[in-house]
Image: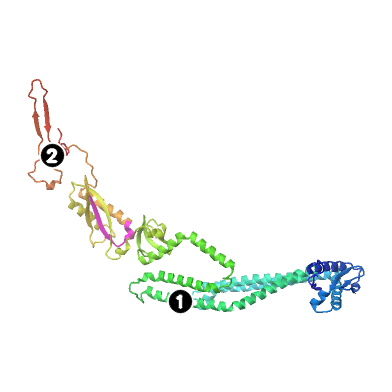
Amino acid sequence: MDGRPVLTVYEQVANLTPEARAQGIERRIVALAKETSIPAESVRIRPRDSWTEILTDSTVIMAVTDADAKATGKSRQLLALEDAESIRRTIQTYRQEHSWRMILRAIFKTALVVLVLLVILWLVRRCRLFFRVRILERIQKSTILKEESAWHLSIAYVGPMILAIGTLLRWLLILALLEAALTITLGFYSSTREISLTVTRWLFTQLEMLGASAVNYLPNLLVVAVIAIITNHAIRLVKLIFGQIRKGDVKIPGFYPDWADPTAKLIRMLLLVLALIVAFPYLPGAASPAFRGISIFLGVLLSLGSSSAVASAIAGVILTYMRSFLVGDWVQIADTMGEVVERTLLVTRLLTPKAEVITIPNSTVMSGPVKNYSTEAKKAGVIFYTAVTIGFDAPWRTVHELLIDAALNTDHVLQQPAPFVLQRSLDDFYVTYELNAYTDTPREVLNIYSALHRNIQDKFNDAGVEICSPHFSSLRDGNTIAIPGQYIKPDYKAPAFRMNLAGAENNGANRATSISGLSPTNESPTQ
């Protein structure tokens, strides 16, 4: 009653379980305690043949049986006397604690507890502000100093962490104070004392279990700490080795220095995954169904939703060791041309000549061709080319000279190796000339093309050579040969037309005239 044990009921009587008997006894004691006209001293015992009654003048409170006495190892008479005395004290205590005097005293104590709580919270707040201001001042001074020592650097980095930990501890302290004040306040009132005692017992039980779990987990914690230390030193060793490879201090045949950073990152990731797998059984709650369920859920989620990411990651690893391009190279991937500004495990980013940053998944890069203009540009230069179509009447040697002269007068075009021209095709009405030139600055390719095309126009216009792709549609003497005039011999004469006249021999027959020769285009005879 009111959080205090009165007596214990051990055995069943008739069809009443011990729980039902205890509830009935509690109701009768409470009713008797509320009836102040009945003195507590009126509680007495009355022996029977098989039980002993505990009663007042008008009410039987309970019966003590031989089975109850046997359960305690006492005589029935002694057990009944002890239970009766406990009931008397309970009635007196109940009447005393439910009096107005005790209620007013409890209210006063509650007000005092609240006042103390407010004072403590105010002190906590003042302490928080005091230390927070001092730490912020230290951090600010450390950031504005030009010559920073190790102490100032540690304050700049550790200071925010201390503030975060202090905030967490402050809230834990506030919650603990509130819980303690609430528990103490509930204990002042008899009607809520049981709640207070229950909460207090639960809290200390949980703290005890937490402490016992922490002590029992110490061997596993030691194993996890050893795994973490070994992994940390292994990562530092990998970083040291591949750092020397990247600088060129350590050389491995067939292993390029630009492979050092991605290989170190890949090995570090594998080491972390291996350490997590080894340490997983030693983590708190690793064997719990909830932990296993979350692990399965995350595995299914990753397997279903990250197929494209996994493909891009694998493609990124393959691209690293294929060395198709490096950061800073000028490349063309699919229809996008630009400078490689970033290459990660998942994507490649290009900066185009239009100042656009294009992000391309590595899986897309792997699925198509990649043109790298920087690899050969760093050596003898990379070739860029453009095509023009000129009629057959322009001498090809003159066209070659004009195109090469236009290329040599263009900025960023190398003099050596020298530009050259290819006659790519002889079409029906014109010749296709392809100008090839070398440059070591492929990033300027747009400006190079623009300047080259301007120079080609200027050179051809100065030489009086027409830049066009003629398509002839004219009537001319098809007997004359169609080659440049410089190749026609001085004594060449175009052949004449040949005419034949044929008549009918019979009287009155119609006469027919036939002319045979070459057509205007010299393609087929016309009759």
Residue matched to label 1: 234
Q: Is residue 438 magenta?
A: yes
Is 124 in front, or is 323?
Answer: 323
What percent of the width, then of the height, locates residue 364?
40, 58
Q: Which residue is at 33% across, 74% downward? A: 253
Residue matched to label 2: 479
Q: Is any part of residue 458 visible from this angle?
A: yes
How is this picture coloured? rainbow
Answer with mark 1 or mark 2, whichever residue precedes in sequence: 1
Instruction: Give residue 306's mark.
Output: none
State the extent of the magenta-drawn residues as a range.
432-445
| Secondary structure category for the residue under label 1 | helix
- Callout 1–callout 2 Cβ contact below 8 Å: no
Is 280 in front, or is 256?
Answer: 280
Question: In the picture provided, is 279 more to the left or to the right than 186?
Answer: left
Question: In the picture provided, is 345 more to the left or to the right than 453?
Answer: right
Q: Is any part of residue 346 visible from this angle?
A: no
